[in-house]
Image: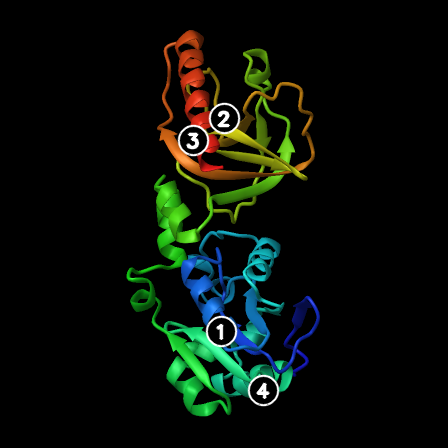
Amino acid sequence: MTNSIKLHWNGAPLTGATAIIGIFDGVHKGHQRIIERALALGNPVVALTFNPHPASVVAPDRIPTELLPLQERIHQLISHGVSSVAVIEFTHAFSMMSAQLFIEEILERELQATKVVIGSNFRFGHKAEGTPKFLADRAKIPVISLDLEAELGAPISSTRIREAITGGNIEIAKDLLTRPHQLMGPVVHGEKRGRTIGYPTANIAVSEEATIPSDGVYAGWLSVGSNRWPAAISIGTNPTFDGIRGRQIEAYALDQKDLDLYDHIAKVEFGWRLRDTIKFSGLDPLLIQMKIDCDKARELTRDYA
């Protein structure tokens, strides 16, 4: 492989397998269908993906937010049956590789793939010159291209899921992902106001690349290590209280009062949107609403489990 192209394996290097290729952001229903079809062919499956997102090189003004960071993307691919994941560093040098050279250097020489399964919208090579037809015509192995809209009966894409999440339509995102949307980051010190009013929250600092739901209150889960608690989650600026602050992601682990989570990596999962962010007239009406929110979150997470 060309020295300027860097490929990293997660799992044992795997040759002679069925290859699936894509960014796989979110590992959503469409990606899962590609994996299922590849597994049905009988060989081990290797996923070839790219990091960072290609737009960071070819269209830096249009970089999408991410549904999953790379390591979680890899985890989801493997949990759905992929044996190993190969990650190509998407650099300027790689973006200049022709579609033909991609086939020869990556698929044939590096992966030694025996079959390839891709979505019908897959593009590759310099200026996205490679199409599924180009791949099928030039590769020396069988290529299966899936029309995921026809397969699933509805359009599905990472873009559609991002739009659902940022619009607060978290249940739609959950259906398309087949799991709750999640955010991860360290628990940081906040204003500690929640602790004084009986609702100690974990303030989660997330990456700038993360896809954050619109401001509001959500029901879901908070996880740290092997612990996973039902939670009420708030996103917003806490407009009821005086002061200017940025958007915060705060999760209250239901009925947990003495957790010390500072500096631990936490995961929040968004199951349902409960309501919009509201500026209350004072603390008492806020506390009444917070009890309603927590009761609803408790009910929803209990029934979901």
Image location of residue 202, percent across then percent down: 59, 28
The residue under label 2 is which amino acid type? Arg
Residues packed near mark 1 inside 10 Å, few (<14), some (14 to 19) or many (20 plus): few
For marks 4 and 2 on the same chain, the one whose residue lies earlier in the sequence: 4
Q: Is residue 112 left or right of residue 276?
A: right
Residues packed near mark 3 inside 10 Å, few (<14), some (14 to 19) or many (20 plus): some
Image location of residue 33, percent across then percent down: 43, 65
- Whole-angstrom CA distance, mark 2 to mark 3, is 30 Å
Disc marking residue 245: 2
Identify the element where label 3 is drawn: helix
CB under 8 Å between discs 1 and 2:
no
| Residue in the image at 53% along x and 42% along y | 183
Residue position marked by numbered label 3 in the rendering: 300
**Which quadrant holds residue 143?**
bottom left
- The foreground one among 10 and 215 is 10
- Whole-angstrom CA distance, mark 4 to mark 3, is 49 Å
- The foreground one among 167 and 91 is 167
- Whole-angstrom CA distance, mark 4 to mark 1, is 21 Å
